[in-house]
Amino acid sequence: MNARSGPFAGIADALAQVGACGLFGLQVLAALPASLRHWRESVRQIWFTGAMSLVIIMTCGLFVGMVLGLQLYYVLSIFGGTAALGTVVSLSLYRELGPVVTALLFAGRAGTSITAEIGLMRATDQLDAMEMMAVDPIAYVAAPRFLAGIIAMPLLACVFNALGIFGAHLVGVSWLGLDNGTFWSNMTSSVDVWKDVVNGVWKSVAFGAVVALIAVFQGYTTAPTSEGVAHATTRTVVFSSIVVLAIDFVMTAFLM
Amino acid sequence: MRVRGLRTVLGRKTIFDGVDVDIPRGKVTAIMGPSGCGKTTMLRHITGQRMPDAGRIEIDGANVPTLSRQALFDLREKIGYLFQNSALLTDYDVFENVAFPLRQHLRLPEDVLRNIVLTKLEAVGLRGAAALMPAELSGGMARRVALARAIIRDPMLILYDEPFVGLDPIALNQVLRMIRTLNDTLGVTSVLVAHEFSAVARVADLVYLLAGGKVVAQGTPEALRKDPSPWTRQFFGGEADGPVPFQYPARDYATDLGFSEAAR
Ligand SMILES: Nc1ncnc2c1ncn2[C@@H]1O[C@H](COP(=O)(O)OP(=O)(O)O)[C@@H](O)[C@H]1O
Ligand SMILES: [Mg+2]
């Protein structure tokens, strides 16, 4: 009780949230088999979280790729190594930028709307109404959105990478006059499917799970007021960003 | 259904302090009381959405607070619950809202399901509104859709939380007749939470009046109307002063406004 009002109130509160979120995650995992009965809900959620995020993911992927193309071309030209542009761009996209930037965008685009939607369902008694109709809201509302996050994130990261490489190609080959064949052949010969591509996919699966879990949890436990929903939405973005970057460090250390 | 020695404390406020209520099978029982006296809380105890601090709530011999989650869900499949604020699912249109309990629990052919849903919507006078979204409904219409949803599976017990709020006189008559018909023809047990005595008196077989965490009066509507006790006189006469305080408990008014001796 005292920890809630002392100078460490923020830390105590955050730790309590982590614990509660972890327990909630277990509940969601336990409800996953039951949620397969509501597979239509899952499909609908993949559409909402995944397909609806495509535009922002594609635009950002393109621009990130173009910036990478410019910056790395400049750096590589100092060492006379501009032929490696394709390799360097695709490695940084597959291994880091793709999963991480996609996850941050995903938290902002899909995470916030999941939190706000579930928060409003809480505030308008819709979750209670489901309980009263003997439908478990964790299986019907939480689990399908969690599942959708896990499925949509890696796909979105792949789209992001593809557009990023296209953007770098646009800048490097079409604009700065790099040889098309060198760009592709250097890339394909030095990018490893398992070490680079698949490890990046694992990262994005983990990020998808974490962002979706945080978003669903924040919505589910929001205070049933408009202010409560607003706070919960903010917390989704803040917590997801921190946790994604922290997990990224840990996974990079282990997957290297 | 029996409630015995119910005690509930929410925050620092004691909502129930030893409440005993008997709800006879096949009858319409009304629970009345000033707003904030715990009527909604009582319904939430009955369905196990909120656990009391002490006391027993028996439905068909089972004590609700001790039931497992699965047993609670089985029980709730037999209970219709009308929420105070309707609580329609905003993602679905009126038809799908009413069909929701059927789709979740039964595998019915689409045309059978459609017939059941349209019959219930017709009963609340909203068959024509089947394709509307909840945001397009007025409060009274939403209330009637929620009512259709509550009775869609022909429950054995229906709990109505303030069913008359926001209804125009025509819809009110319709809903009153429906509550009565459900009871007379299907033998449903109904619990009605409300504070409009005139409407309640037309359907209820038995009325409980709650105030200050206790049952202060009970009996048939006629008996209560003639009851000379100050509780009933105040509540049904609508006077501000009496044993039921109109004011939420507060500090002395003069102190709050800064007029008292102590504040100078
Ligand atoms: N979650 C809660 N925490 C603390 N107090 C609550 C909570 N829910 C309701 N209350 C209090 O309980 C009392 C009864 O509420 P309720 O059952 O909704 O009253 P009503 O009879 O109007 O339906 C109110 O005074 C309200 O302030
Ligand atoms: Mg109420």
Image (cartoon, helix red, strand yellow):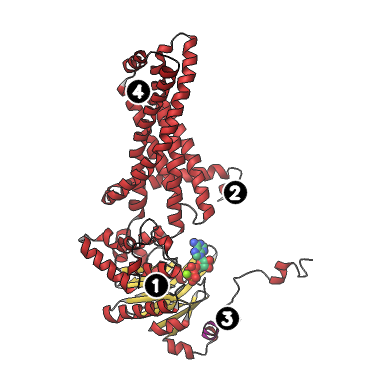
Whole-number angstrom distance, CA of label 2 to CA of label 1:
41 Å
Q: Residue B243 bears which disc, if any?
A: 3
Q: Position of residue A117 (x, y in %)?
A: 43, 51
Whole-number angstrom distance, CA of label 2 to CA of label 4:
47 Å
In the image, B192 versus B212, the foreground residue is B192
**Foreground tag (2 vs 4):** 4
Q: Residue A5 bears which disc, if any?
A: 2
Q: Residue B160 bears which disc, if any?
A: 1
In the image, B187 versus A186, the foreground residue is A186
For the residue marked with disc 3, what is the amino acid? Pro
Discs 1 and 4 lie in a common subunit: no
- Structural crowding at the residue carrying mark 2, measured as other residues with C-alpha within 10 Å and reported as few (<14), some (14–19) or many (≥20): few
Whether residue B62 appears in this view of the structure is: no
The numbered mark 3 sits on a residue in which chain? B
User: Which type of secondary structure does the marked residue at label 1 adopt?
Assistant: strand
For the residue marked with disc 2, what is the amino acid? Ser
- Structural crowding at the residue carrying mark 4, measured as other residues with C-alpha within 10 Å and reported as few (<14), some (14–19) or many (≥20): many
The numbered mark 4 sits on a residue in which chain? A
Residue range corresponding to the magenta coloring:
B232-236
**Foreground tag (2 vs 1):** 1
Whole-number angstrom distance, CA of label 1 to CA of label 4:
60 Å
**Foreground tag (2 vs 3):** 3
Report if the CB atoms under discs 1 and 4 are less than 8 Å apart. no
Residue at 40%, 46% (x, y): give it: A23
Q: Is residue A90 left or right of residue B115?
A: right
| Figure quadrant of residue B58 | bottom left
The residue carrying mark 1 has its beta carbon less than 8 Å from ligand 2: no
For the residue marked with disc 4, what is the amino acid? Asp
Q: Is residue B215 left or right of residue A256?
A: right
For the residue marked with disc 1, what is the amino acid? Tyr
Q: Position of residue B49 (x, y in %)?
A: 40, 63
